[in-house]
Image (cartoon, grey):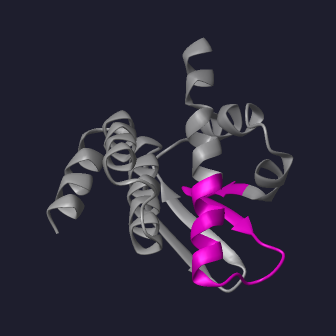
Amino acid sequence: MEIINDAEKAAEKDIWSLMQFTENLRRQYGKEPYSMEILLKKLYVRRMAADLGINRIYASGKMVGMETRMSKRVFKLMTDSMISDVHRNSLIFEGGQIRAELLLELPREQLLNWIFQCLAELHASLPALIKY
């Protein structure tokens, strides 16, 4: 339980603290068990979402929605600098929400992986905003 609390505290600080926590955890205990991997992934999703100004993520059928405070212009700058065409082409910005229409409804764990990968790409594009 202490490890989970430490992970949550690291995630509250910033993404780098969470990454450092994960590295130290793996160095000390080896590869984390599957349940811990899922927990860490959820913490990473929460942290990246917070960094991106996303305050709610939800899924309904084949649609994933993310309520955000970012503007359409910022969204465009970020998606233009995304590497993956798959994620870039599936994202739409409408009325303060980022939406993605998936090809099929994913099981929870695969959905978490998709959201994680999508947010990781958006998060990696944050430096593109510095140019402007």
Q: In this view, does 41 lie to the left or right of 75?
A: left
Asked whether residue 130 is drawn in magenta, I would say: no
Relative to 121, residue 117 above or below = below
| Percent x, y of residue 25 | 33, 49
Q: Nearer the viewer, residue 90 or 4?
A: 4
Asked whether residue 109 is drawn in magenta, I would say: yes
Residue at x-position 65% and y-position 43%: 121
Relative to 38, residue 125 above or below = above
| Percent x, y of residue 2 | 14, 62
Relative to 121, residue 129 above or below = above
Relative to 107, residue 110 above or below = above
| Percent x, y of residue 68 | 48, 53
Q: Which of 60 and 117 is in front in this view?
A: 117
| Percent x, y of residue 104 | 80, 81
Picture quadrant where residue 102 is located? bottom right
Residue at x-position 63% and y-position 73%: 111
Instruction: Tell which residue pokes out farthest to the left in this image.
Output: 2
Picture quadrant where residue 124 is located? top right
Residue at x-position 25% and y-position 47%: 12
Q: Which of 87 and 20 is in front in this view?
A: 20
Quarter holding the C terminus?
top right
Quarter holding the N terminus?
bottom left
Q: Give the range drawn in magenta.
A: 92-117
